[in-house]
Amino acid sequence: MARQSASKPAAFQHDKTVGSEEWLTPKPLVDALDLPRLADVDPCSPRRRPWPTAKTHWHKAHDGLSRPWDVTAFYWVNPPYGAACRLWMAKAAAHGNGLLLIFARTDTRAFHESVWRHRNAAAVLFFEGRLRFATPNGQEAGSAGAPSALIAYGQKAYEALVRAVRAGTIKGRIVPLMDAGKIQTWPRPQRRFGHSQAPAPVSATATHPRAAAQRPARGRGGRAS
């Protein structure tokens, strides 16, 4: 087993915090998504941060979990990975307009409720390799103790993932969770986001149970039953 360098802090294993330390969104990911321009609000920001992750930052005293969220604003959510993580996941999913960075624990009840089965979840991006989070002074930590995923809620979030993967600034695979024509736009337009305008799927995709359930069964003659 490789030893951690004495000058580099070890990454967290099961929680976003270890003692009093806070683990921040990696700078390469901030740049890949252009978060200072993309996101209106980061509701999980630390008081001290080496780089911006949104136009507005809420720290612990702002209590972003309890306060109402602006329905027109795009949120970047990198929540504490402890017991409250599921609450942040549910909040982001209900809001429906933003990106959520979490561990890819796809078997958990929270993941099923706020991602797999949630009507606002547009896509999941599974990263290639482990992320390296950062300390409040900007120092890169070791690899995270679990794989990570980005959850896209809404059209803007979905398109941000598509741009980053196509540009090669993020390596991973996007799994759409709904038909492009059903992805919600924010603010909601008068005309629904059409199939002809939808961005093409990136890399290999998987069929989500919601989509499969909506397909009519076909008989031997090829006609829907």
Image: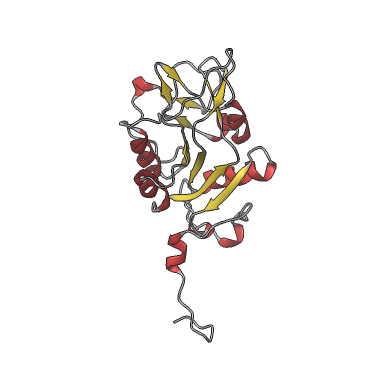
Q: Position of residue 151 (x, y in %)?
A: 48, 43
Q: Position of residue 28 (x, y in %)?
A: 62, 29
Q: Which residue is at the far left?
A: 66
Please say if 164 is above or below 145.
Answer: below
Residue at point 33%, 37% (across, down): 87
Q: Position of residue 52 (x, y in %)?
A: 54, 23
Left or right, residue 169 beside residue 186: right
Please say if 70 is above or below 13.
Answer: below
Based on the displayed image, in which of its 4 quarters is residue 89 positioned?
Answer: top left
Please say if 7 is above or below 177.
Answer: above
In which quadrant of the rendered image does the N terminus lie?
Answer: top right
Residue at point 51%, 34% (across, down): 39
Left or right, residue 89 beside residue 39: left
Foreground: 139 or 14? 14
Q: Position of residue 7 (x, y in %)?
A: 59, 12
Foreground: 31 or 5? 5
Whether residue 220 appears in this view of the structure is yes
Q: Which residue is at the far top?
A: 7
Based on the displayed image, in which of its 4 quarters is residue 110 positioned?
Answer: top left
Q: Which residue is at the far right?
A: 167
Left or right, residue 205 beside residue 59: right
Foreground: 186 or 34? 34
Whether residue 156 appears in this view of the structure is no
In which quadrant of the rendered image does the C terminus lie?
Answer: bottom left
Left or right, residue 69 beside residue 181: left
